[in-house]
Image (tube, rainbow, N blue to C red):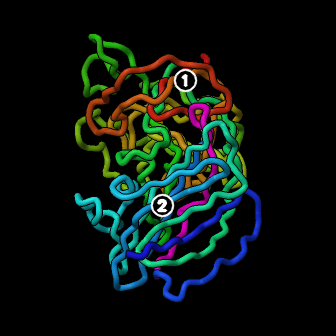
Amino acid sequence: MIIARLKMFFCLLLAASPALAGDPHPPPLNVSFLAQPSPIVQNGQTRLFYEMLITNFSKSAYVLDAIEAKAGDTQTKVSGPAFAPLIANLGVATPNDERVARTIGGGRSVIVYLTLDLGKSAAPGAIAHTLHVLTDQKEPHDIVPQDKPIIVAPPLRGQWIAGDSVNNLPDAAHRRAVLIDNGHAWLAQRFAIDWVQIETVNGQATTFKGAEDKNESYFCYDQPIYSVAPGKVVDASDGMAENVPHSGKYAVAIGFNNAAGNHVVVEIAPHRYVLYAHMRPGTVQVKSGDRVHAGQILGHVGNTGSSTEPHLHMHIDDQPSFLAGNGVPYVFTEGEASGPIEANVSSPGLIHLGPIGPEHPFKNDYPAVNALVTFKQ
């Protein structure tokens, strides 16, 4: 088996790369990225989360054998069976056989979900990738990432779980939510967080006390939601009925345009929109065109739209849309946070949490997956 190497460079500064020597028989694979990668500081560590789209323009199949990344002194490689969980085969069910999962059939496409941990180091000037496939090829690509993460104030007060914050696990619901609109692949929820509150009930950490099917039983229900930055409201919606928690159905049919339920979208910078979703009906306090300031109450936590129990879904993307945009990184000014926690926050059923470690103060950071986070009252 001959291994091909497709080498891509993406630079934090605009720069040109010299062309690499061509291969007389290059594999007809087109490699691109869903969005320009940007660094984020998560739990004190600099990380990159991004997605590679590979399309096979031939009639033959190619096997993805390994991928290597080099960023300054940081080098990483994923190969063989460990590579398979990072790959999503578009248009077909995920194969059980790991080698089949790593195979791109003729005319097929895959998305590779990548993460690069840089530790305490800043993002370097260039990151080189080598993708190993069946046939030998080297091809250069220059990509200019987005700006550094936006620094924003907390959207909530008190102690919360940062549910399904960005991670690269196979069941990461936000991270894997690639959607197609008008012929374009979007991942608006790349850095989305589902915020819920927990308390200990009968020795177990849980999000509610009392009747499971009553929204009022959930600790976060009706908590105020605050604007994370000054800006202009570009979209606001109220009046959608609430769902019955964990009932397996929604109060109204859910589609592309109403998945956010009662919501507010605030433009805080050019091509930077903050979405606050699933608000309680009757609590949205702003309308399109309003100017808001950081810390202003926008609405209250509810359970509307594509939601199975009360929570705040918040993310920032580059379009004024819940789903048709590309999520961009952001960090919160300050607070206290634990490390990662095992939890199934995105499950349609009851939320279960693993052991929770101690919280530590942070500044300008994004929480670890499912971390316990405290924002000042």
Question: Residue 79: percent from the left, percent from the top?
Answer: 41, 57
Q: Give whichever of 213, 352 is nearer the camera.
A: 352
What residue span does the magenta drawing correspond to?
Answer: 28-46
34 in relation to 232, above or below: below
State the mark number for residue 67. Answer: 2
272 in relation to 42, above or below: below
Looking at this view, name the residue that lies furthest to the front. 1
> Can residue 38 be found in the magenta stretch?
yes
Question: Residue 158: percent from the left, percent from the top?
Answer: 54, 18
| One can see residue 247 in this view | yes
323 in relation to 183, above or below: above
| One can see residue 288 in this view | no
Question: Taking 7 as reference, is 14 left or right?
Answer: right
> Residue visible at 67% across and 44% down?
149
> Residue visible at 34% across and 83% down?
60
Q: Going from the N terminus, do you reach mark 2 or mark 1 first? A: 2
Q: Give whichever of 3, 225 is nearer the camera.
A: 3
The residue that label 1 is drawn on is: 337
- Mark 2 neighbour density, 10 Å: few (under 14) some (14–19) many (20 or more): many
State the mark number for residue 294. Answer: none
For marks 2 and 1, give the CA distance.
33 Å
Amino acid at circle 2: Ile
Question: Residue 252: percent from the left, percent from the top?
Answer: 32, 47
Amino acid at circle 1: Ala
> Can residue 147 be found in the magenta stretch?
no
Secondary structure of the residue carrying tag 2 is strand
Question: Residue 366: percent from the left, percent from the top?
Answer: 58, 35
237 in relation to 81, above or below: above
Q: Give whichever of 82, 91 is nearer the camera.
A: 82
> Residue visible at 25% across and 28% down?
213
